[in-house]
């Protein structure tokens, strides 16, 4: 059930990119996709019965792998920086164009 909700989140973001014409809404849709992918990765990486290697007093047990956690933190930081860069690009477009609709920007910039 949780996997279906995560895939629905990814699909909502995908359809938002395709169907929305406002550039800010496209950026938000990309963030929704990123959140869904990160949630799916966390769902796959989490397993029952694993212990953390630092706070566990139990010996001879299966420890959880810290690499997926580091990858997720890296993905969050990279996603945030890409989103900030896209918003700066939209701000520069907003200086030259009266609207942020992609159809209108294409119509104004075609020779």
Image: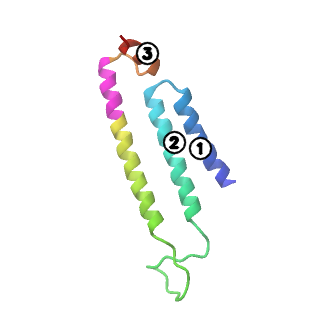
Please name the residue shown 47% across and 32% down the image. 26
> Which corner quadrant of the image does residue 84 belong to?
top left
Disc number lying in front (1 or 3): 3
Q: How many labels sit on residues?
A: 3
Residue range in magenta is 87-96
Q: Is residue 29 left or right of residue 2?
A: left
- Residue 62 screen position, x and y as percent: 55, 80
Which mark lies nearer to you, 2 or 3? 3
Point out the tag, 1 or 3, that comes first from the N-terminus: 1
Q: Position of residue 28 (x, y in %)?
A: 47, 36
Q: Is residue 73 above or below residue 35?
A: below
Question: In x, y percent, where is residue 30?
Answer: 48, 39
For disc 2, the marked residue is: 32
Residue at disc 2, secondary structure? helix
Q: Quadrant of residue 97?
A: top left
Mark 1 residue element: helix
Locate the C terminus by quadrant.
Answer: top left
Q: Report the residue marked by disc 3.
A: 104
Magenta-colored stretch includes residue 79: no
Q: CA distance from mark 1 to mark 2?
A: 7 Å
SS category of the residue bearing label 3: helix
Do residues under tags 1 and 2 come within 8 Å of each other at their CB atoms? yes
């Amino acid at each position: 059930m949780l996997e279906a909700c995560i895939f629905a989140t990814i699909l909502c973001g995908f359809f938002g990119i395709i169907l929305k014409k406002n550039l800010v809404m496209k950026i938000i849709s990309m963030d929704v996709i990123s959140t869904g992918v990160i949630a799916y990765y966390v769902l796959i990486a989490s397993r029952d019965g694993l212990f953390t290697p630092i706070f566990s007093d139990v010996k001879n047990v299966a420890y959880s792998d810290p690499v997926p956690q580091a990858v997720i933190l890296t993905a969050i930081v990279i996603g945030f920086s890409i989103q900030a860069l896209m918003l700066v690009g939209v701000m520069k477009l907003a200086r030259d164009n009266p609207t942020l609709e992609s159809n209108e920007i294409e119509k104004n910039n075609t020779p």
